Image (spheres, rainbow, N blue to C red):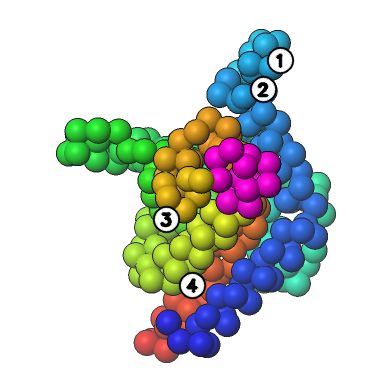
Amino acid sequence: MDIVSQMKYLDLLRTSAREAITNKVSWFYIFVALVGQITALSSPLTSIIPSIKLISSEFWFVSVVLSWVFISALVYSVSQKELNNHASSVLDSWRKGWSKIILVGLLNILFLVALFVLLALVGVLFRKLIPYGFLGTLISFIRPILYFGICAIIISNGSVVAAIRTSILMFIRNILQTLVISGILILIQQALLDIIVLVFMSQYDYGILTSPFKTLELPQVMFWDQVLALTISPWIVIVFTHLYLSFMNTSASTTLTTS
């Protein structure tokens, strides 16, 4: 990777991080997603506050649906600012996200089904379940396909089938850049998690360097890894939204040059 490419990637990450902090939609998404995570049945809080179990399924379902809306709203907000230099309000972004909830929800479900089938095939081949650490890394590398699909629905007003086709082709054609960005994001998230473990869970710090994947399987570490992933998720969505727009511009320029 040359220095120019490194600067381009770092500038993309820096700009997207700034947008994630200043965009109000990001904070709404984080709040909704964390409420769903905290009230999930797998949350450590259920052992401290048993009454959470009575509301967890309802809150979790609502939070998932609202998360889809806010992710779509965030994609719309970012695209409007880049394409039209227009700062859309939270309400306008919400309306756009809500109008696409069925398509985005269906796309998410299909992505999860495909992921489950892939994991099942891997489990059959290797005759064992994939550890949580490897699973998280695998998902992090292929999640751009999902985000490109959401962008295709929100920005290009495509159908689910068209979004799937666009996202897969875009991922394949730009696989090197996409994997490099994904790898950088994985390293950043792991570094942040290591800091959390060192500061708040020092009893597990021995495993950070010796067996990081085993450390991730500890319930407390796993919980905070999921919380961290949800917290930085708007940043990641913004990064891949910018990548989608960049790849679309490159594709359009190539088409014009060819014709």
Q: Residue at x 62, y 42 (%)?
A: 202
Label number found at residue 141: 3
Dot 1 or dot 3: first in sequence order is 1
For marks 4 and 1, give the CA distance: 47 Å
Query: Is the Cβ of the residue at disc 2 closer than 8 Å to that at disc 3?
Result: no
Label number found at residue 247: 4
Dot 4 or dot 1: first in sequence order is 1
Please give the range of residues in magenta: 193-205
At label 2, counting other C-alpha atoms closer than 10 Å, the crowd grade (few under 14, some 14-19, many 20 or more) is some
Instruction: Mark yes or no: residue 182 visible.
Output: yes
Query: Is the Cβ of the residue at disc 1 closer than 8 Å to that at disc 3?
Result: no
The amino acid type, in three-letter code, at marker 3 is Phe
For marks 1 and 3, give the CA distance: 35 Å
The residue carrying mark 2 is 45
For marks 2 and 4, give the CA distance: 42 Å
Horizontally, residue 175 falls left or right of residue 60, namely left
The answer to whether residue 196 is magenta is yes
The residue carrying mark 1 is 49
Horizontally, residue 4 falls left or right of residue 78, namely left
What predominant SS class does the magenta segment belong to?
Answer: helix
As helix, strand or loop, the secondary structure at mark 1 comes to loop
Instruction: Mark yes or no: residue 61 visible.
Output: no
